[in-house]
Amino acid sequence: MADERFLAKLWATIESRKADDGAGTSYTRQLLANPAKIRRKIAEEAYEVNEAHQGLVDGKDSKDHLAHEAADLLYHLFVLLASADVTPSEVYAILERRHAPASPGASGPSAGGKNP
Ligand SMILES: N=c1c2ncn([C@@H]3O[C@H](COP(=O)(O)OP(=O)(O)OP(=O)(O)O)[C@@H](O)[C@H]3O)c2ncn1[C@@H]1O[C@H](COP(=O)(O)O)[C@@H](O)[C@H]1O
């Protein structure tokens, strides 16, 4: 059974594609060379996630389809982050701070810092 630890492997592969400017076909390298395309793909994949979710809620689509679209979105999000030298650890740290129990006197998840 796959779990979120696989994301570290995927990130390492994306980083290795970024470091490797050799010849050969790599979809990741093609995306990294074209930042406008990465942004376009994120919008496209997010739309497809929404469509798959709508289909599922309406009883016309499967959980499997939604999972596939979510996988595409996660992959493209990682490529976008890699292109900007932002690591998943930085993202996880923000989520972790938001998740931390609020200190006395603070209110809600913003106590962990919702914005930069
Ligand atoms: N996880 C992924 C992954 N998820 C989705 N995709 C690609 O993302 C594209 C999305 O498909 P679409 O149908 O939306 O678009 P398309 O028409 O095929 O492509 P576009 O012309 O729109 O870009 C497909 O080409 C998929 O193959 C991925 N491509 C690569 N990876 C992983 O990235 C790593 C490096 O891959 P390479 O860069 O290809 O070596 C490997 O571990 C791969 O498993």
Image (cartoon, rainbow, N blue to C red):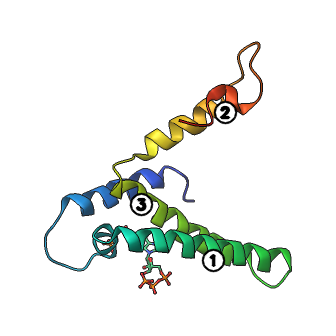
Q: Which amino acid does label 2 sit on?
A: His
* SS assignment at label 2: helix
Name above or below for residue 81 compared with residue 95.
Answer: below
Q: Which residue appears at 72% of the width and 22% of the height?
A: 102
Q: What residue type is labelled 1?
A: Glu
Q: Residue at x 59, y 37 (%)?
A: 115
Q: Between tags 3 and 2, which lies in front?
A: 3
Q: Earlier in the sequence, mark 3 or mark 2?
A: 3
Q: Which residue lies furthest to the top in this view?
A: 104
Mark 1 CB near ligand 1 (8 Å cut): yes
Q: Callout 1: helix, strand or loop? A: helix
| Disc on the earlier residue, 1 or 3 | 1
Ligand 1 is found in the corner quadrant, namely bottom left
Pinpoint residue 35: horizontal percent, then vertical percent: 36, 67
Q: Which residue lies furthest to the bottom in this view?
A: 60
Local secondary structure at mark 3: helix
Q: Where is residue 13 in the image (x, y as percent from the top left)?
A: 32, 60
Q: Is residue 52 left or right of residue 10?
A: right
Residue, x 76% and y 29% (percent of image)?
108
In the picture of the structure, the residue carrying the numbered disc 1 is: 48
Q: Is residue 4 above or below residue 56?
A: above
Disc 1 or 2, which lies upstream in sequence?
1
Report the Cα–Cα distance between label 3 and label 2. Answer: 24 Å
Q: Residue at x 25, y 60 (%)?
A: 18
- The quarter of the picture where residue 82 lies is bottom left
Residue 112 shows which numbered tag? none
Q: Name the residue under label 3.
A: 80
